[in-house]
Image: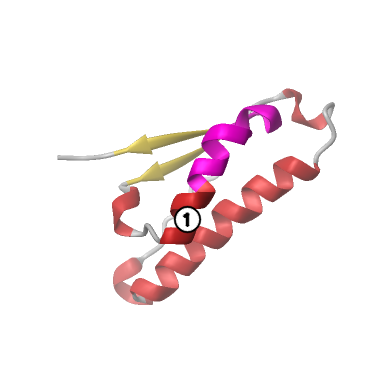
Amino acid sequence: MVIIRIPNRKLGEIATKTLVHWITLKTFMTRMLMDKEKQKNGCFIVFNEPEQCITEGLTKLMGLIGTEGRKERLGSLYAFHH
C-alpha cells in the first residue's frame, strides 16, 4: 500500500489537480502494461474527497477505471466525509 498525501494548500489548486491526474493515469497505465501473472494480485486506488481535485479529464479517467479496471484487476474506492 502506498499513501500519497498532496498538500494542496502549499502546492496550489492547479498543481494538485495535475498531480492527482498524473498519478491516477500512471497507476492505470502500469496495470495495463503488466502481464497477467503480475496482475494476479489486485490493486485498489483510493480517492479521498475526490471533489477537491476533480477535473473533466480525471472524471473520464475514473470512468474508464470503473468500466475497464476490472480487466486489469484495478479497483477504485471513493471516500467522502461529512
Q: Which residues are magenta?
A: 62-74
Q: Nearer the viewer, residue 65 or 48?
A: 65
Q: Is residue 5 above or below residue 67?
A: below
Q: Write down the quadrant of residue 79 in the picture.
A: top left
Q: Write down the quadrant of residue 14 in the picture.
A: bottom left
Q: Secondary structure at mark 1?
A: helix
Whether residue 69 appears in magenta in the rendering, the answer is yes
Q: Main secondary structure of the magenta part?
A: helix
Q: Which residue is mark 1?
A: 58
The residue shown at (34%, 76%) is 12
Q: Position of residue 59 (x, y in %)?
A: 44, 51
Q: Position of residue 17 (x, y in %)?
A: 42, 66
Q: Is residue 1 visible?
A: no
The residue shown at (52%, 35%) is 66
The residue shown at (81%, 31%) is 38
Q: Is residue 3 above or below residue 43?
A: below
Whether residue 8 appears in magenta in the rendering, the answer is no
Viewed as shown, does residue 75 lie left or right of 40? Answer: left
Label 1 amino acid? Leu
The residue shown at (36%, 59%) is 53
